[in-house]
Image (cartoon, rainbow, N blue to C red):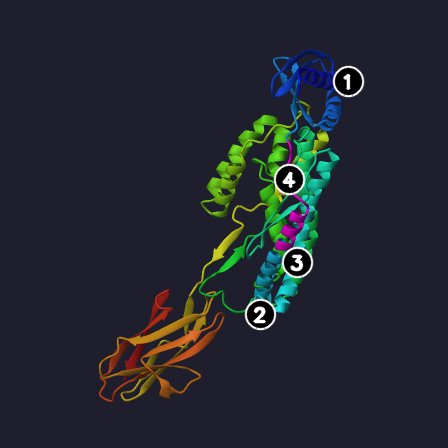
Amino acid sequence: MGQADTAAEIEAIKSVVGKYFPIYDVKVSPDSLTFYVNPDPKTLEKGFEKLRKDLGEKSYIPFIDYKSGEHIIHIARKPEIRRRGIWVNWVLLAATFVSTVVAGAYWWASYSANYSIFDGSNLLWGAVFFAIPLLAILGAHELCHYLMSKRHGVEASLPFFIPSIPPLGTFGAFISMRDPMPDRKALVDVGVAGPIGGILVTIPVAILGLFLTSQGGVQQGSIGDAGAIGFIMQPLFELLTYIIPIPSGVVMHPMAIAAWVGMLVTAINLLPAGQLDGGHIARGLLGDKARYLGYATIAGLFIMSLFYTGWLIFALLIMFLGLRHPAPLNDISKLDIRRKAVGAVALAILVVTFTPIPVMQIVPEYSYEVNVIGSNTTIVAPGGVANFTMTVNNTGNTDIHMRLTVQNILSDWSAGLHLSNQSSANSTNTLDFDLPYGNSTNVTMEIRVPTTAAAGTREVVLYAVSDYKYQESMLDFRIQVS
C-alpha cells in the first residue's frame, strides 16, 4: 500500500472516530492508530459501541482507555480468523453422543443389575436417561452463551462438544469467541448466561431423576473388591431431596446422575478464574482486580486437591490457559445495578452447585459380627458333647470369606464346626465359608469331652477372621465338666 493509500485510510478511520468523539490529537504507529478524544461521559458508552460496530465492518478493532487524565482510543486491524466448517461441530456432537450413550449404559447396567454394558437395552436406556438429558444441559449452557454473544454483537462459534470415556462420557462443551468482548456489561451477561441456562434445564432433570430414583429398589449385592464410586450431593441437589424424598440404600437413577454432572459442570464453570464463565463475570464486576480473586481460587483448588485430586487437574488447566482475563474493548464504563444483581445470582448458583469433594471412593469393608445364641458357658458330663451356636453377620459392604478355627483344645478333647443347616458329619476344626453381602448364617460348635476328663472348668477359644485378616477376633467359651 502506498503512502497516499495509507494517508487515505487514516483519514477514513479518523472520520469514523470523529463522528462519535471530538479528536484533539492523533498518533500513528506501524501497528495501530491512537486518537486522543474528549468524550461526553453521558454518551461515551453508546458512542463507543457504535464506533466498534462501524469499524468492525471495516475489519478494525477499537480499544478505549483512560490514562493520566486523557481518554485514548487505539485502533488495530482485526486479525484474520481461520474458520472451520460446521461439520466439525456435528462430528464432535455425534462422537460425544456415542461416548455419553456408552457412559449411560454403564450407569444403567449398575442400576438394572444387567452388567453387560453393551447389551441393547442398556445402550437404549443409557441414551434416554443419561446421554440425552446430559447433552440437553450442556447444550442449553452453550446455546445461552451463543445467543447472548450475538445479542452483544460478538461473533461466536456454535458449540463444540468434547467426548470422553465413561463414567461421564464427556468433558463438557465450549464455544469459540471470534471477537473481543466489547465492555464489562457484555462480560457479565455472556458469562452468566450459560450457567443460568444450564441450571434451568438441570433442575427439572434432577427432579425427574429423583422421582425415578425413589421408585427404584434398595441396593442389593456387594460393591465388589474394587470398591465403588460415591457421589457427594450438592446443596441444591440436597434441597431437591426434601421435595422428592428418596429412601436410603436405593441405587441412583442414571437421570439423577446426569443432573448431578450438570451441577458439577455449572459449578466448575463458575469458578472466578481465567477464561471460565466465573472469570468473565469476575472481570466484568471487579475489573483488573479480578486477578486477585483468580489467584485465591487457584490457591483454594490446590488446598482442596489434598482431599480430592481432581481439583489439582482443574487448577493446572486454568493456569495453563491463563489466569489473567483480557480486558474488554471498553474497560472504563461502569456497571449498572442490574449487572451487579446478575453477579450476585451467579455467586448464588456457584454456592448451591459446588461441593468441595464431589466424588469419593467407597472402599470394600470386610467387617462382620459373631453373636453367641444363648450362653457361652455350659455344663457337660465326662464323655458328653458341649454345643454352642452362634450367628455370623456380614456387616460390611461386600461379600466376604470367613474362616473359623477352634483353639486352646486339650490334646485328648476334640472340636468340630459346621454350618447349622448342614450335618455334624461335616464338622471340622477349621471351617471356611462364603458370606454374601447383607447375609448371616448360623454356625454350630461341638466340643467332645472325653470320659477321662477331670472335673473343672475349661476354656475354649474360637478364632474368627474375614478374608484372611481384614478383620479378626476371638471369642471365649467355658465348659464346666462335672
Q: Residue furthest front?
A: 2
Residue 88 counted in the magenta span: yes
> Disc 1 and disc 3: Cα gap in Å?
57 Å
Vertical placement of 414 versus 250: above or below?
A: below
| Residue 343, x across and y down, in percent | 66, 35
Q: Which residue is mark 3?
A: 209
Can residue 245 be seen? no
Residue 380: quarter of image: bottom left
Q: Mark 1 or mark 3, which is nearer to you?
A: 1
Residue at (55%, 55%) from the top-left corner?
A: 165
Q: Which residue is mark 2?
A: 114
Marks 1 and 4 in Cβ contact (< 8 Å):
no
What are the residue bounds of the magenta stretch?
A: 80-95
- For numbered disc 2, what is the local secondary structure? loop
| Residue 302, x across and y down, in percent | 47, 40
Q: Which residue is mark 4?
A: 176
State the residue in front, 357 or 378.
357
Q: Which residue is mark 1?
A: 19
Q: Amino acid at mark 3?
A: Gly
Q: Amino acid at mark 2?
A: Asn
- For numbered disc 3, what is the local secondary structure? helix
Q: Mark 2 or mark 3, which is nearer to you?
A: 2
